[in-house]
Amino acid sequence: AKNIKLDPSPLCCFLYPPFRCAIAFLMLDLTDELDQLHQLVKESFPPDERHQEGSGKLMPHMSMVYAPLSEGEKLFSRVKSIREDDDLERRLGEPMRAKYLSVWSTEGKTSEWKQIARVELPQLL
């Protein structure tokens, strides 16, 4: 089985007060394969306050950095400098192949998050 192709957008950054952090991330194109994986996860785990049924479209992404809110301006500045570096921005935007799917518990503070499972994707496909 083949690995899932991930097609990222430019690096982005935003403040996320519910987690009390700033997040730098790459948005990923929503492919049929990612949507199928999302459906499998939804069948296995109940929704929480952030992921209610009908709460919006799936927005696949790859989080790169979680920083405390107090460091948000530094993270925004760093993301801006990366986006201004054409070579680095180009390399970050190149398609990638996912080898693993990991599921995380995001209860509590980010320091309390823990990986629940990690599976090689070819085993799922």
Image: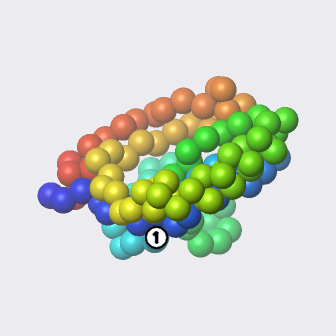
- Quadrant location of the C terminus in the rendered image: bottom left
In this picture, is 124 found above or below 72?
Answer: below
Q: Residue at x 48, y 32 (%)?
A: 115
- 84 or 37, nearer to the observer: 84
- Quadrant location of the N terminus in the rendered image: bottom left
| Image quadrant assignment for residue 50 | bottom right
In this picture, is 21 found above or below 39?
Answer: above
Residue 76 is situated, as x and y percent measured from the top left of the image, at 74, 50
Instruction: Tell me how the rendering is colored.
Output: rainbow
Relative to 98, 18 lies left or right:
right
Kind of residue at disc 1: Asp
Q: Does dot 1 land on a helix, a strand or a loop?
A: loop
Q: Is residue 97 visible?
A: yes
Q: Residue at x 46, y 62 (%)?
A: 90
Seen as rendered, the residue at the extreme left is 1
Q: Residue at x 59, y 72 (%)?
A: 57
- 29 or 49, nearer to the observer: 29
Relative to 85, 120 lies left or right:
left
- 84 or 16, nearer to the observer: 84
Q: Is residue 61 visible?
A: no
Q: Residue at x 56, y 45 (%)?
A: 64
* Residue designated by label 1: 29
Residue 54 is situated, as x and y percent measured from the top left of the image, at 64, 71
Mark 1, residues whose alpha carbon is within 10 Å: few (<14), some, or many (≥20)? some
- 124 or 6, nearer to the observer: 6
Relative to 125, 103 lies left or right:
right
| Image quadrant assignment for residue 5 | bottom left
Q: How many marks?
A: 1
